[in-house]
Amino acid sequence: MIKKLRPKDYNDAFYVGHCFRSGTAVVMDVSHLPDDVARPLVDFCAGLVYGRGGDMERLDRKVFLLQPPARPRIAAAHIPDLAHIAD
C-alpha cells in the first residue's frame, strides 16, 4: 500500500510521520508549496527516514517516496500516477 500526501503546510508533517511509522510507503508531493515551506518538511522527512532505517527517493523536483524499513522496495515505475516521472 502506498499513501499519497500533499501537505498543506509544515503542520502536516504529523500525517506523513504517522503513515510512515505505521509501515506504509508514502509519496509526498510538495510541488505546490513555496521552497521556504517545502524545505523544512523534506528535512523532517529525511530525518524520519534515517532514524527509522528506511529509504527516501526523489521522484521529481518536489515529489519524494518514503519507504519504511524491511519492506519490499517500490520502483517509481510501479506507482501509476507517477510512472511518467521514472523516465
Image (cartoon, helix red, strand yellow):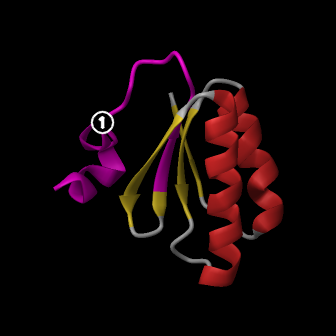
Instruction: Please identify the quarter of the rendering in which residue 52 is found.
Output: top right
Q: Position of residue 36 (x, y in %)?
A: 68, 82
The image shows residue 61, relative to residue 36, as above or below, that is above
Q: Which residues are magenta?
A: 64-87
Residue at (72, 30) in percent of width and height:
21
Q: Residues within 10 Å of mark 1 (few under 14, many from 20)?
A: few
Query: In this rendering, is residue 26 above or below 38?
Result: above
Q: Residue furthest left?
A: 87
Which residue is found at the position 62% from the left and 60% from the top?
42
Q: Is residue 76 magenta?
A: yes
Please provide percent x and percent y for residue 28.
55, 54
Q: Is residue 10 left or right of residue 59?
A: right
Above or below, 38 against 53 in this view is below
Residue placed under numbered mark 1 in the picture: 75
Q: Nearer the viewer, residue 51 or 26?
A: 51
Q: Quadrant of residue 72?
A: top left
Q: Residue at x 78, y 66 (%)?
A: 10
Is 30 situated above or below 13? Answer: below
Q: Secondary structure at mark 1?
A: loop
- Residue 38: % across, % down: 63, 72
- Say left or right for 9 vs 67: right
Q: Quadrant of the C terminus?
A: bottom left
Q: Check disc 1 and give the amino acid type.
A: Ala
Name the residue: 76% across, 47% down: 15
Coordinates of residue 13 in the picture (x, y in percent): 76, 54
**Would you say 11 lies left or right of 33 here?**
right
14 magenta-colored: no
